[in-house]
């Protein structure tokens, strides 16, 4: 396991994840497409929000299970709580410092077909 620090653009939201770097995912659901999201999945016990809880705004839609967080100052999406596995977060890998994006395989997941 490796630990990475992450933040939104304005640094109000800061967090840390532990990950085995097994895979990244894209998703074809309506919100991931618009966010151009490239994500890594981590269990909630491997995710620590260090600061900025009050700067996080939640957006929900459709089944209202997933919780999509964004910074209410700079508008960046740092992570979301997942719908099928709500004890996991999908983390925006572009928010992680010194993250080896190009060394990890990317899997395209199907979100749009979920009812
Ligand atoms: Zn911010």
Image: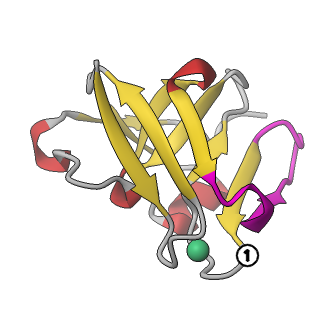
Q: Nearer the viewer, residue 53 or 81?
A: 53
- Residue 56 part of the magenta segment: yes
Could you tell me residue 52's position as x and y percent? 67, 60
Q: Can you tell which quarter of the image residue 31 is in?
A: bottom right
Q: Is residue 99 above or below residue 12?
A: above
- Residue 11 part of the magenta segment: no
Which quadrant of the figure contains the N terminus? top left
Q: Is residue 93 above or below residue 24?
A: below
- The answer to whether residue 27 shows anywhere in this view is no
Range covered by the magenta-colored residues:
51-66
- The answer to whether residue 79 shows anywhere in this view is yes
Q: Quadrant of ligand 1?
A: bottom right
Residue at point 20%, 53% (across, down): 98
Residue under label 1: 72
Outermost residue toward the left in this view: 103
Residue at point 54%, 32% (across, down): 47
Q: Is residue 3 above or below residue 98?
A: above
| Secondary element at image label 1 | loop
Outermost residue toward the front in this view: 50
> On the rendered structure, is 95 left or right of 2?
right
Could you tell me residue 109's position as x and y percent? 46, 35
Q: Indicate yes or no: mark 1 CB to ligand 1 under 8 Å.
A: yes
Q: Is residue 64 above or below residue 51?
A: above
């Amino acid at each position: 396991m490796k630990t990475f620090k992450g933040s939104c653009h304005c640094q109000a939201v800061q967090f840390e994840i532990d990950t085995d770097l097994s895979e990244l995912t894209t998703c074809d659901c309506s919100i991931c497409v618009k966010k151009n999201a490239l994500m890594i999945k981590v269990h909630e016990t491997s995710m620590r929000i260090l600061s900025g809880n009050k700067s996080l705004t939640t957006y929900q839609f459709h089944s209202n299970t997933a919780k999509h967080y964004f910074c209410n100052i700079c508008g960046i999406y740092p992570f979301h709580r997942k719908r099928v596995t709500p004890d996991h977060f999908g983390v925006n890998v572009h928010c992680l410092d010194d993250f080896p994006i190009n060394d990890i395989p990317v899997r395209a997941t199907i979100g749009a077909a979920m009812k």
